[in-house]
Amino acid sequence: MARLGANQYGKAEIRLMKVDRGSERHVLHDLNVSIALAGEMKEVHRRGDNTVVLPTDTQKNTAFAFAREHGVGEIEEFASLLSRHFVDSQASIHRARVHIEEYAWERLGTAPHSFAQSGREVRTTTVTYDGRGHRVLSGLTGLVLLSSTGSEFRGFAKDRWTTLAEASDRILCTSVDATWRHTGQANDWGKSYAAARAALVEAFADTYSRSLQQTLYAMGERVVSSVPGVAEIRLSLPNRHHFLVDLQPFGLENPGEVFHVDDRPYGLIEGTVLADDAGEDAEAW
Amino acid sequence: MARLGANQYGKAEIRLMKVDRGSERHVLHDLNVSIALAGEMKEVHRRGDNTVVLPTDTQKNTAFAFAREHGVGEIEEFASLLSRHFVDSQASIHRARVHIEEYAWERLGTAPHSFAQSGREVRTTTVTYDGRGHRVLSGLTGLVLLSSTGSEFRGFAKDRWTTLAEASDRILCTSVDATWRHTGQANDWGKSYAAARAALVEAFADTYSRSLQQTLYAMGERVVSSVPGVAEIRLSLPNRHHFLVDLQPFGLENPGEVFHVDDRPYGLIEGTVLADDAGEDAEAW
Amino acid sequence: MARLGANQYGKAEIRLMKVDRGSERHVLHDLNVSIALAGEMKEVHRRGDNTVVLPTDTQKNTAFAFAREHGVGEIEEFASLLSRHFVDSQASIHRARVHIEEYAWERLGTAPHSFAQSGREVRTTTVTYDGRGHRVLSGLTGLVLLSSTGSEFRGFAKDRWTTLAEASDRILCTSVDATWRHTGQANDWGKSYAAARAALVEAFADTYSRSLQQTLYAMGERVVSSVPGVAEIRLSLPNRHHFLVDLQPFGLENPGEVFHVDDRPYGLIEGTVLADDAGEDAEAW
Amino acid sequence: MARLGANQYGKAEIRLMKVDRGSERHVLHDLNVSIALAGEMKEVHRRGDNTVVLPTDTQKNTAFAFAREHGVGEIEEFASLLSRHFVDSQASIHRARVHIEEYAWERLGTAPHSFAQSGREVRTTTVTYDGRGHRVLSGLTGLVLLSSTGSEFRGFAKDRWTTLAEASDRILCTSVDATWRHTGQANDWGKSYAAARAALVEAFADTYSRSLQQTLYAMGERVVSSVPGVAEIRLSLPNRHHFLVDLQPFGLENPGEVFHVDDRPYGLIEGTVLADDAGEDAEAW
């Protein structure tokens, strides 16, 4: 009658704060950890036999205990540690995927123990372990970038339903959601992340944009060509429309000064850029 | 140096209300339409050449104009119409995917023109057209179901980090996110949707649950075995934990009466159920 | 240098589910309880002396324990019980305010233990107790109403910045946020709530609307004039704009059929309606 | 039967971006403007007579046109300008209240036209004009602060429902929502804002906290005593609980290192601090 297809289960959104108190100046690791396990799960689905089901509550406990035992460090490392643990310790688990979001804090001046949360931007990782090796993705989400000039949109296809005027000078604004795939282990995940973030920002600022697609490609190309060990990047860029307000009814010109920031609908540009010599690796995603 | 991989672009979240005024009793179609087009997009990414880029603004206009010209009807039909249009009318577009959410309204008594929005539950469809045929998914999201008894969780795997007590009578609560794939065109999409929704709800209510995985499978099996033309269903079921409050410090028993509803973390159970004779169709998703 | 002004503290958003298991057919009370206490709090603010500070954690425990000891019943009663408790048992607490949101569930068919969450609409109460008596507010939020005709907006004031065209037939849509004040204790809070909700909905459906202000007043007047014991109602009605889409560029008329549902900005109409003989009671709010 | 009480209406959440292009280095003003007007509004409520109703659409137009004509500058000034305009130009409008949120952007390096949105923190103002003078509030919301030590909670009141253990070293974390009232016009609103923000942050970091109330008072006192022209400040501080995870079941100590960040319920501490010589001014709020 029916059969089980792909499936996974786990604990999502474990909100974990680790304070490193090793020195007078504390360091924070503020994480949101999500775990998904897959394996021989037929019996639990078909008969409710939980014999091989490690509770999601246990997965949560493990995340907290590992933070204490091993520290957190870079999120790619912590996700690698956790994902390997579940596969290596539970015979029925064949694949573990751990996704972590990290929220940034900045020290208040020189205060050793006081912090302010910085930015909307979130650093991410997704590590998949299948018993043989780790596949590591890094990324960021919520980085909102804007160019107040240096962007146009012209020469596009037109059909019966096209009313959009060509724009030779517009605001370009997007919230960057980017995930990149590593070919192996980085020497220093924090340094690698900083380099990728810088490449994204610099390519956005450098590129005279004829379309958001062009900007997306430029950002992706910059990352895969300048950050060692990055094979592929996937970008999802909403076009946060800033519409020039028509002030002519009030006898006013509006030379690129006053805009209405619109919520919906929005353009959504999604694309992948690969290093020239990189293969695909569908299982990493 | 770098090459372009998979990519698509389009207008997302077009909020469209269509009022059928054909009779005294108006009918509402309250939609959120998202369009994604893919095709020969190398030049726009690499050089900013927009020659084959149909603006996302045009896509929005098309959705509104088609609602007027053709009506909306069932969302699977409207998504099919829109997706075919973009591929058939633009040589450079090879695949169009249209995702629609529909919000339900109920008539206020017998009032012909007055309505209240009903429920958090949203009906969805995703239609993919590649020039040869339509692949149609239907679904729903935000349907929150709860059993106040008839659920247990026992006999699970235990390791060093397991502290969870076995539960012989617990609250089971989830917010159903389900998407099912049709083998072809339904005779009546509305009827098919109603049957799938009923199957999900009835299987949830009928199943004595030894785990949420078992409930998921029962829900999926019910749909693929009872709704004609459904080949596959994918379910994502968060376990909305209701924790029994320990009232012993206050000298009170708590025999399954008072619970704390927790936000995070939550268990997340994801699974696919296929009809016995169904093949996979990765391109539909 | 400085002095302390008005202040209060408490536990907010205690998510409490109470299952009445007294009969085979379970009954759910799904609440979000927020408690705010005020009194002699100078020393804690100025010196961190917690002697008279009942922990917010204790307040949470009390809500759970009272749900077990006394049951929940109508939210106005549960809020009255809780607010009285804190003032009567803690000499330093002079005023307690308890706000409760209740989420509705509907039984799945005739199933005794299975439910679906119904609607976006939330029933609310705020009870203030000051040692002498209770002030009781009831309300609802998130009730989204729409009229597809029977609404106009004409004859309004115009100035240099007015471009809006007069509308003789428009969609009127709002999300009702209403709070009403009782003169004393209702005999049956559930019945009183149902009457107020019905009055709001019926006045909305009955009123030919020349402005949302007129609709607001009609809704408020219906409640204070038809629901026994209601002295005052405060309504906050966002105007959820549905803009007629201009289809003329495509050679199409649009006789009130296709609308764009806009997010922001939105009109916001706020008003109070009092029963003719009612006084004000600022301390209730 | 019924009578109209307090009421106001206006356009809410006008999302306005003003780009100052006066020099090579652009400057952004990214605002969310909400306008509320009150006056002789009986006839529109009772009879739908819109004669004195200036459309909310016109209010929106006015905000955009004024941004072009007068520039935006400091949000307190822009809100003052707008609020005065409506009262002075419409005889039937007796009071205008303009609330503005401003979102911060930081320049990308030395790029003249490229920016990243900074932080979750939002600067706010509310200006009320009644035909005689302006009442000005400034504020901020969404500033998340944390101390990883230097906070305790002991010596509190205990009753039958108290189970909380005393804490001699805990994490203190809050999201600051603060609004302060000016006695008149500041010389430099931006400088005044920076001083108030610095006072809040420094008092948070400086204060050894025996309770969040004490921290609240210290923050408020610092503002009213150090920022010229500030008469009063109102603070709303949720206690974002970080609970120490019990790792004893796993044979691990947890000396203030691993915490679970909880969502709900949360403590909520609200208080007002006034300058010693300041009176109240209810109409400002």
Image (tube, coloured by chain):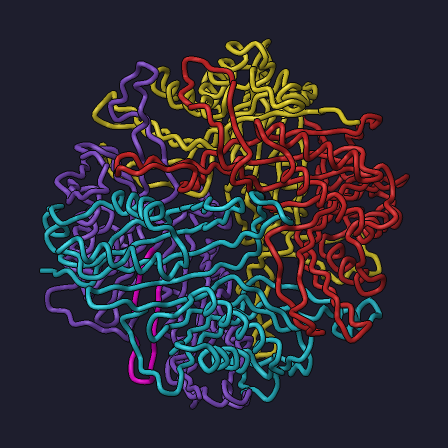
Chain colours: A red, B yellow, C purple, D cyan
Left or right: residue B68 versus residue A86 is: left
> Percent from the top left, x then y, of residue A122?
65, 50
Q: Residue furthest right?
A: A132
Occupied quadrant, residue B245: bottom right
Dominant SS in magenta: strand
| Residue drawn at (39%, 30%) of the image | B16
Is A178 above or below relative to D267? above
Left or right: residue A70 versus residue A206 is: right
Q: Is residue A39 visible?
A: no
- Residue A263 sits inside the magenta stretch: no
Left or right: residue D186 versus residue C179 is: right
> Percent from the top left, x then y, of residue A146?
55, 42
Q: Nearer the viewer, residue B210 or C49?
A: C49
Occupied quadrant, residue A226: top right
> Percent from the top left, x then y, of residue B61?
41, 23
Is B100 above or below relative to A189? above
Is C131 above or below relative to C226? below
Q: Is residue C134 visible?
A: yes
| Residue drawn at (15%, 38%) of the image | C154
Q: Nearer the viewer, residue A258 or A159?
A: A258
Q: Residue furthest front?
A: D23
* Boundaries of the magenta span: C125-140
Q: Nearer the viewer, residue B283 or A216?
A: A216
